[in-house]
Image (spheres, rainbow, N blue to C red):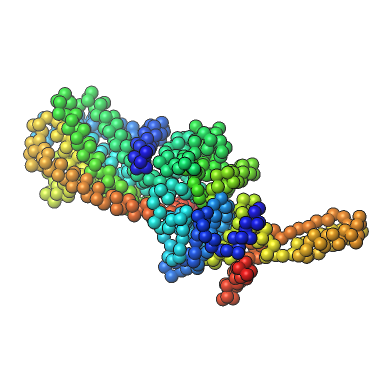
Amino acid sequence: MTAVELAGVAETPHPPGKDLVLDVRDLRMRYGSTDVLHGVDFTARRGEVLALLGPNGAGKTTTIEILEGFRMRSAGEVSVLGVDPGRGDERWRARLGVVLQSWRDHGKWKVRDLLDHLGIFYRAYATERIPRPWPVDELLDAVGLTPHADKRVHQLSGGQRRRLDVAVGIVGRPELLFLDEPTVGFDPAARREFHELVHRLADLDETTILLTTHDLDEAEKLADRILILAGGRIIADGSPDELARRVAGDAEIRWTRGGERFVHATADATGFVRELLTQHGDEVQELEVRRASLEDAYMALVYEQESGARAGAAARVWQQGSEA
Amino acid sequence: MNPTTAAVRAGLRRGLIELRNTFTNGQDLWNYFFPTVVLLVTMFFMRGSTVPGTTFSLGARTLPSALGMGLAFGGMLMLASQLVVEREDGTLLRVKATPNGMLGYLIGKIVLLSTVAMLSMLLQLLPAIFFLDGLELARPGAWLGLLAVALLGLVATLPIGAVIGSLIENPRNLGLVMLPTMGLIALSGIFYPINGYPGWLQAIAQVFPIYWLGLGMRSALLPDDLAAVELGGSWRHLETVGVLGAWAVLGLVLAPVVLRRMARRESGSRMAARRERAIQRVG
């Protein structure tokens, strides 16, 4: 992961410049008398992959739908590719890709026909830098649907259908791609191929990607930066590594010596192991160092937020830490 | 190419693809053929009866009326139900996420439904020629009149269908539109002249397009003498154009507003909520 760049992001929460693809400040959403979002802030730069995590009902879908221009916000400043999504025109729309959760539309269409047809709408929006649409054969190949190109959509399996959803989302070569739980229903091989596709989009085509997932392992593999949304606020913003380190600083070290089992928790795992090996050398067996995982960090942060909210004082320890 | 032109072209192409898809789908073909067969069988048995006060075959009078009814069905109810169903399955959201996608979608639907309506008409008309006497198909004006009424009928009914389809959220509620339409057919003199009905029932029938589509088709395909047994004793061409035109204007004014409102409100979470309800309905 690109830790060096991320340090820079942490220092300046709103870096200026044209590379800023997403700029969300103090975004608020209220349904009736219920506040769903209480001031969400984050940014994304070109080519960055962001994972938006959070418990169900935290406001992830609402946030994404506001950014997609499918829902009006109550308050706050939002800029998506330099445009307010509430006033985005078709030219702006052509620069976005949207993959929502499990659709079952166009069942009678052949896979190739559908991609070919939807691609036509983007042709007029091609630029010198970005040829649009993505040629159908290449696209089918990129998502692994070439053998199924002439099948009807309703004949596809769940995983194939999902890959078609992704293909539809990227047929216009979006500069910004929204992925809502993209790999639900994928088998491990399809999941790995999908991860490679995401890396390819981000690295080669400089596509900025905002994805939501409940799979923390996936978030860790894909995302340059992780945002945790809980209780209508972003309670954490950083690389997976940073999050894990910041929240649960201690690593756990296990080893056996003379048939006896030891466990030790420390922030400086490398130093401790060096010391341990110098002192006991060959006697140390089955050495294991376990860093705090993203999952540990996620659970700790969400728990902290929820218990803080219950106590009436939102615990914003993490944000204070990152802004210091 | 200009993006709007591109979308219009894509829409035309969309219509053609959907036509190919629907004519290669067994279920859809059954839905087209079955009512046609029922209708033809009905007319076959009506061919011996006569229109009251004449010696003209009642079956031959019913055929053009039924063609008019078919247009109203094809234009209004098919578009309405497709909009409702395709809103629920995510087609409209997909289209909304595509630049100028809504324009392309609507053009595609117009191409699809007009073609299906025209083909259904031919499907009913051609076999009927062989067992019904009295249709004046050799008259040069007949086919022209048929085409003119068909086009006017589509312009009058498609926008209304779009409005109905946008207002209904739940596919279950389509029945709320189907039922009154069936009643209206009974009122509109499709299968039997309504001269004997009380005046107020005749008035209601003459507000809606079905009556006028039936009348227009009859005027195109039947001998002129039969105008005598219509209300007012004439084909009333001016009134036909007037009423159908008024529906067309009303629809074309309302449809863009209602469609835009419907499209604006469409989002992933609304779809998810609808799906939840659908699952609860089944479970």
Regarding residue A251, the answer to whether it shows in the image is yes
Is A188 on the left or on the right of B99, as rendered? right
Work out whether residue A188 or residue A234 is closer to the camera in this orientation and state it: A234
Q: Residue B234: horizontal and vertical position, in percent? A: 8, 38
In the rendered image, residue A177, in percent from the top left (x then y), is placed at: 51, 49
Q: Residue at x 30, y 34 (%)?
A: B115
- For the image, the number of numbered tags is 0
Q: Tell me which corner region of the image, top left, top right, bottom left or bottom right, holds residue B231.
A: top left
At horizontal 44% and vertical 41% (from top left) the residue drawn is A126
Query: What residue is drawn where x is 51% and y is 42%?
Result: A167
Query: Which image quadrant: the C terminus of chain A?
Result: bottom right
For this view, does B10 lie left or right of residue B282?
Answer: left
Q: Nearer the viewer, residue B122 or B66?
A: B122
Q: Residue furthest front?
A: A17
Residue A57 appearing in the image? no
Side of A186 where A86 appears, left or right: left
Q: Residue A293 at x, y = what percent?
A: 69, 58
Query: On the rendered structure, is B274 left or right of B162?
Result: right
Q: Considering depth in this image, is B88 or A120 the residue closer to the camera?
A: A120
Residue A318 at x, y percent in the picture:
62, 68
In the rendered view, tell whether residue B141 sits above or below residue A18: above
Furthest toward the bottom, the residue is: A312
